[in-house]
């Protein structure tokens, strides 16, 4: 099937479903309550993550026949995404009641979801050496699984940190997924390209309802699933047969959430605060405090993300 069909399907499902999820969230009082560290001052409907996940799910069923399911690592990716969606919904439910869900339980589920990627044949398995005939250097299985899990759990959480301004997480996800799509095309990886453009389509479809002023937000059920999918696509596709230098390509493709989170974690650790506790030290908070509007803030971060993505493409093309 043509790859554009994946993106269009995910876009249409997410775009059409988001308003319905908004109505359901309002009816069930499934709304994000404002507090001292959040920008919005009124309760906002959650359940946007359901529209996002439904879009990606529809693209998967469209692109993979039943007999092909067990032949792709993306079966494991989809199961892991479903696990994170479920625990994310539970976490969001606790927020609607003004409570905090267990961090340790969320972390365990994230690890289990990440383990599904190498279990189904994906993950960071080695790199192509630029010396001695460009032969593939495999890394030990235990190290491969460890690196894959660290990468996926890390990106899942840093992407969750990014969801603080209307339209920011969805827009960055679209830019990063589009970059991973082109990387997969260059590598001839049709499955990764199909999944990456599905994430792009779902994110853009949802963004129509999530851009300032947001009428619905994705919640943890959306942000963690997006982060997980992007990390998994990178580990299955972009890291596969990467050279020593081009290992940095997927890191640059996801540069904004990764480097912003590293900076924030460092600041929190230096101040003696728990690194997992949300605060207002992210780049988008800094831009808002500097006097920019939400739209201007999001636009600036979009441009920074686009620069990271362009850099990743240049690195990949120079090392082909």
Image (cartoon, rainbow, N blue to C red):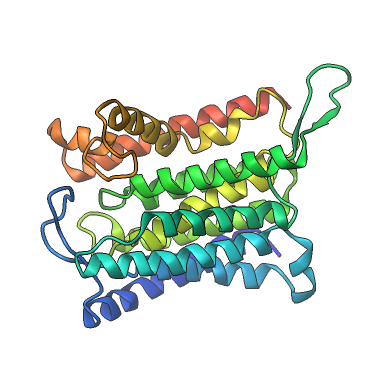
Where residue 76 appears, as percent x and y from the top left, is 66, 61
The part of the image, by quadrant, that contains residue 297 is top left
- Horizontal side, residue 160 vs residue 70: left or right: left
Q: Is residue 46 visible?
A: no
Nearest the eye: 156 or 68: 156
The part of the image, by quadrant, that contains residue 286 is top left
**Residue under the point 52% across and 53% down:** 228
**Residue under the point 30% across and 39% down:** 274
Nearest the eye: 201 or 119: 119
Nearest the eye: 153 or 260: 153
Q: Residue furthest top?
A: 131
Where residue 99 appears, as percent x and y from the top left, is 23, 64
Where residue 88 appears, as percent x and y from the top left, is 40, 64
**Residue under the point 64% across and 73% down:** 61
- Horizontal side, residue 271 vs residue 244: left or right: left
- Horizontal side, residue 128 vs residue 25: left or right: right
Where residue 272 appears, as percent x and y from the top left, is 26, 31
**Residue under the point 28% across and 74% down:** 22
Q: Is residue 225 above or below residue 245?
A: below
Nearest the eye: 263 or 45: 263
Q: Residue furthest right?
A: 133
Where, quadrant-wise, is the C terminus in this rendering? top right
């Amino acid at each position: 099937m043509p790859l554009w069909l994946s993106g269009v399907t995910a876009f249409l499902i997410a775009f059409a479903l988001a308003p319905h999820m908004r109505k359901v969230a309002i009816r069930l009082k499934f709304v994000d309550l404002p507090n001292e560290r959040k920008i919005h001052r009124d309760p906002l409907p959650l359940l946007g993550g359901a529209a996002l996940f439904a879009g990606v799910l529809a693209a998967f069923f469209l692109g993979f026949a039943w007999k092909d399911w067990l032949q792709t690592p993306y079966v494991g990716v989809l199961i892991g995404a479903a696990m994170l969606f479920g625990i994310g919904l539970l976490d969001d439910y606790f927020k609607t009641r003004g409570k905090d869900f267990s961090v340790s339980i969320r972390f365990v589920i994230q690890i289990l979801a990440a383990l599904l990627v190498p279990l189904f044949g994906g993950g960071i398995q080695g790199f192509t050496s630029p010396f001695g005939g460009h032969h593939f250097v495999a890394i030990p299985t235990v190290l491969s699984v460890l690196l894959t899990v660290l990468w996926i759990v890390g990106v899942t959480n840093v992407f969750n940190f990014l969801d603080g301004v209307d339209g920011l997480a969805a827009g960055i996800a679209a830019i990063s997924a589009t970059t991973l799509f082109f990387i997969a095309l260059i590598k001839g990886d049709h499955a990764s390209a199909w999944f990456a453009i599905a994430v792009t389509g779902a994110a853009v479809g949802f963004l129509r309802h999530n851009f300032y002023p947001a009428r619905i937000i994705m919640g943890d059920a959306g942000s963690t699933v997006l982060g997980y999918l992007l990390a998994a696509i990178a580990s299955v596709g972009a890291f596969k047969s990467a050279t020593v230098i081009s290992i940095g390509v997927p890191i640059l493709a996801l540069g904004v959430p990764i480097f912003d989170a590293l900076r924030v974690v460092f600041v929190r650790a230096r101040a003696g605060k728990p690194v997992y506790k949300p605060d207002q030290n992210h780049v988008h908070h800094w831009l808002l405090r500097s006097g920019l509007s939400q739209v201007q803030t999001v636009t600036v971060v979009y441009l920074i993300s686009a620069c990271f993505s362009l850099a990743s493409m240049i690195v990949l093309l120079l090392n082909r």
